[in-house]
Amino acid sequence: MSLWPRAAALLVLLSAPAWPEERTQLMGTPEGRIFWVIPNYRTVDEARSIHAISDRDKLRIATKDSFDPYAFPVAGVFAGISHLQNRDPSWGRGPEGFGKRYLGALADQTLSNMLSEGAFPILLHQDPRFFRLGRGSILHRLGYAATRVLVTRGDDGSAQFNASEFAGNAVMAGASSFYYPQQDRGVDDAAVKLGVQIGVDMVGNIFKEFWPDIKRKLTGRP
């Protein structure tokens, strides 16, 4: 083979589109856990994300977020906060009370993930992923991350009201009446739980946006 055909072949290879390698993110990985602990399978970089995912992939994301090994100690943290604040006082303050709060927190966490990341995105044709910007000013990224509880991407790529977030967590809040003390059940309690969960998810989105930057500062590595 002469020099010119070889050179031409090399130019073709070098000029081939790079996006198949760059746009490889379907979901997050275990290495992306926030603070190396909190499961973060929903998060993908916007520029590298696969455009749309299947219903099966939505269930995979919800399941991975729900049953990652670190999901269980995370539920323990929320249970510990409830225990210290003596929420649901009929459960008591001892180890038995903590155990009940732990099971309640784990059930809330699992239902929230499975419904808002799996079931409702499938029913409503919405994408449950958080698309991290990773560019722009801090204020722009902060506003973007905080509003993702209100705005999500449809399967067709359009911006939509995040009905999956609200419907999934509303059903979770209502279903929790079956496993929390009878005296702590009611519309007001469910509304508070819904509001708290939306707030937690909003803060979580902010950490999802900035965690790679924080990690880089802490470790000096990407």
Image: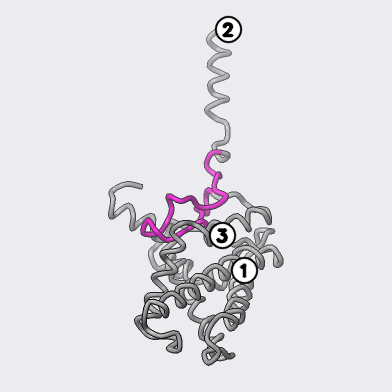
Q: Residue furthest top?
A: 2
Q: CA distance from mark 1 to mark 2?
A: 60 Å
Judging from the image, what secondary structure is the residue with disc 2 in? loop
Q: Residue at x 54, y 23 (%)?
A: 11
State the residue at coordinates (42%, 61%). Answer: 38
What's drawn in magenta, residue-wise?
21-48
Q: How many residues crowd around disc 1 within 10 Å: few (fewer than 14), some, or many (20 or more)?
A: many
Amino acid at the residue labelled 3: Arg
Q: Is residue 165 toward the left or the right of residue 45 in the image? A: right
- Residue 10, above or below 41: above
Which of the 4 image quarters holds residue 63?
bottom right
User: Where 29 falls versus 137 (above or below)?
Assistant: above
Does 192 appear above or below 204?
Answer: below
Q: Which residue is mark 2?
A: 1
- Three-letter residue code for mark 1: Leu
Residue 186 appears left or right of 89: right
Of labels 3 and 2, the one closer to you: 3
Q: In the rendering, at what x and y percent does residue 36 appear?
A: 37, 56
Q: Position of residue 148 (x, y in %)?
A: 53, 68
Residue at image mark 3: 129
61 on left or right of 30:
right
Dominant secondary structure, magenta: loop
- The x, y position of residue 98, in whole percent, is 40, 77
Residue 179 lies in the magenta stretch: no
Find numbered disc 1 in the image and state the secondary structure of the residue it sits on.
helix
- The quarter in which the N terminus is drawn is top right
Local packing at callout 2 (Cα closer than 10 Å; few below 14, some 14-19, many 20+) is few
Name the residue located 42 percent from the left edge and 78 percent from the top edge.
Answer: 96
> Does label 1 or label 2 sit earlier along the sequence?
2
For badge 2, the amino acid type reads Met
The residue at which mark 1 appears reads as 115
Does residue 39 belong to the magenta stretch? yes
